[in-house]
Image: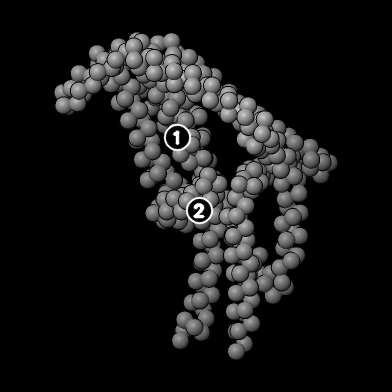
Amino acid sequence: MTSSPDYRFHAAWLAITAVLLGLVWWLAPVLTPFLVAAAMAYALNPLVVWLQARVGKGMPRFVLVLLVEVLFLLAVVALLGLVVPVFFKEAARVQAQLPTLLALLQTDLAPQLARLGVEVNFDQPSIKAFFSTYMSNLWDSGLSSLLASVQIGGSVALALIGNLVLIPVALYYFLMDGHHVLAHARDWIPVKAKDSVGGFIDEADAVLGEYLRGQLLVMLILSVYYVAALKLFGLSVAWPIGIFTGLAVFVPYVGFGIGFLLAALAGFLEMAPMQAGLMLAVVFGLGQLIESFILTPRLIGERIGLHPLTVIFALLAFGQLLGFVGILIALPASAVLLVALRRLRSRYMASRLYAG
């Protein structure tokens, strides 16, 4: 009988958690910029704390926050500066050298496919006309969509611009006041639960720190791998494409896809089609295998206590539930859930219900 209030207490907290998760699912599109800013703030806050410890209390915190945020945004702009010029340069080269590329496909790739029983004829005039028409339609429809979006209230344009403005603003306030908000949130915890909930928060924070360090290590290793692998195949733009692809794996699938597209554009222009195809298959196929089955499970999954299969399932499940936001938060959220499950298991094993 003495344990019944504890069960009611835990049931109340489970109900609150379920309501919060339901709100996150319902408000996922609205929460996206805040979740992105919160993740950035969690990653950058240790740097702010480190700087504050070095310079002392004489320097206002907002100055250090602005310094860290500006340096971070400059790094993001520099990363985009590596990739965007390469993309436009390669796209222009594709359009200019399309006849040469089609001739290479006809002379090199078609005979190889014919040996496999696949007859392919690259009709150069038709393909060139289709490509020109497609690019023209894509540009016209994209411009028309953008103009229509602006005219009807800017649902797309304003959302993009709003997020670009909102994320840095939210990041600043998260870095400035996040620790105060967490302190006030701890004050709401009932006295009898302060030790257990506080311990849970501290353990979850330690696990998330391990996740962040593991993710940074994965990004560094993959950046080195993609640069070296693309260099071995003789790609002239191996440095910007390799660095971007490695760093952008923080956003699952998106970074890999853009890096693959850039390498494909450059590869088919700089080398024979068969060599370019081999480069893409080997470099990006092996890179995806290394990331998915070795680096992420070992350097992230093991650091936060998740089995490799759990890592893969978490990415798929959270992506299904919350879309792109779910993919971003899949592993850190799974790490926090793992901490909660460990504590529930220890309580259950110590309870009279388990002992019978």
Quick check: 252 above or below 119?
Answer: below
Residue 244 spot, x, y in % from top left: 50, 29
Q: Amino acid at mark 2?
A: Leu
Location of mark 1 (residue)? 256
Quadrant in the picture for the N terminus: bottom right
Q: Secondary structure at mark 2?
A: helix
Distance, label 2 to label 1, CA atoms, is: 22 Å
Q: Position of residue 274 (x, y in %)?
A: 28, 21
Residue at left offset 46%, top offset 39%: 253
Quarter where residue 33 is shown: top right
- Can residue 351 be seen here? The reply is yes
Q: Give me the residue at 46% from left, 84% from top.
A: 355
Kindly tell me whether residue 83 is visible in this rendering.
Answer: no
Q: Residue at x 64, y 76 (%)?
A: 9
Q: Which residue, given by chain and number where applicable, does mark 2 sit on?
A: 321
**With 223 as the anchor, is 153 left or right in this view?**
right
